[in-house]
Image (cartoon, rainbow, N blue to C red):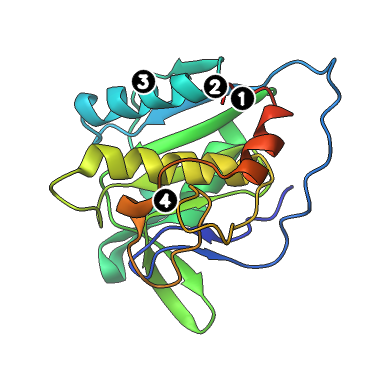
């Protein structure tokens, strides 16, 4: 079973512990994976449709799944939060071979970071892997949909094997404790080149 490597966009925003391997060229004859947008039942249709529409501009095979309840076993009562690692494990167990699951929620999600038992975050994913999750809980109220998309595309980049990027406007930027979401514009040349080998339409 793949181990979850912490790839987050949270209150202190993104972190990436070493473990993402350098990308390897894709066998050009290999079939494209399918990205499944999986809303939990608390996510609004408006937000889900925005993320779906924007991801479709970047990748040719995207499907919208029917909303499902957020798994109660992921609930962390002490902080009234949901453990992001439990959510990703749940998604990973349910995923269909050849698919990646991108879950969306409005709930407060968290992760253990270093000595901090319960650290609030915006997203978590496997790197590389088959599942990730993004939350609106810590987003700006003025452009929530756009910020959620940027978190989602960042996490999807990690599932494709991308590490954090030093380019300040790249979607794969590590925010290092600050919210730079509004400064992100696109994938940089290097990240874009890697995703092109995975079939992304950039």
Residue named by callout 2: 59
- Outermost residue toward the front? 189
Q: Position of residue 127 (x, y in %)?
A: 66, 49
Can residue 4 be seen by looking at this rendering?
A: yes
Q: Earlier in the sequence, mark 4 or mark 1?
A: 4
- Above or below residue 76? Residue 131 is above
Eye-nearest disc, 4 or 1? 1
- Above or below residue 92? Residue 108 is below
Residue named by callout 4: 73
Give me the C-alpha separation between circle 4 and circle 1: 34 Å
The residue shown at (29%, 71%) is 78
Residue named by callout 1: 200
Q: Residues within 10 Å of mark 1 (few under 14, many from 20)?
A: some
Query: Please, what secondary structure does the residue beneath circle 3 have?
Result: helix
Q: Position of residue 171 (x, y in %)?
A: 48, 47
Q: Nearest the camera: 17 or 58?
A: 58
The residue shown at (40%, 64%) is 13
Query: Label for residue 137?
Result: none
Left or right: 50 in relation to 133: left
- Outermost residue toward the left? 142
- Above or below residue 117? Residue 185 is above
């Amino acid at each position: 079973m793949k181990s979850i490597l912490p790839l987050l966009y949270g209150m202190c925003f993104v972190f990436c512990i070493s473990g993402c391997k350098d990308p390897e060229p894709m066998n050009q004859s290999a079939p494209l994976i399918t990205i499944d947008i999986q809303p939990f039942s608390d996510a609004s249709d408006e937000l889900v449709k925005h993320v779906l529409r924007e991801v479709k501009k970047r990748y040719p095979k995207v499907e919208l799944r029917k909303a499902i309840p957020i798994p109660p076993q992921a609930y962390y009562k002490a902080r009234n939060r949901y453990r992001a690692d439990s959510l990703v494990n749940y998604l990973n167990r349910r995923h269909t071979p050849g698919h990646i699951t991108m879950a969306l929620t409005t709930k407060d999600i968290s992760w253990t970071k270093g000595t901090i038992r319960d650290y609030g975050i915006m997203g978590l994913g496997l790197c590389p892997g088959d599942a990730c999750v993004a939350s609106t809980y810590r987003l700006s109220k003025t452009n929530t949909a756009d910020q959620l998309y940027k978190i989602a595309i960042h996490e999807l980049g990690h599932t494709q094997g991308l590490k954090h990027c030093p380019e300040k406007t790249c979607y794969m930027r590590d925010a290092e404790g600050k919210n730079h979401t509004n400064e992100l514009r696109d994938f940089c040349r290097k990240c874009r080149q890697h995703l092109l080998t995975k079939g992304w339409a950039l």
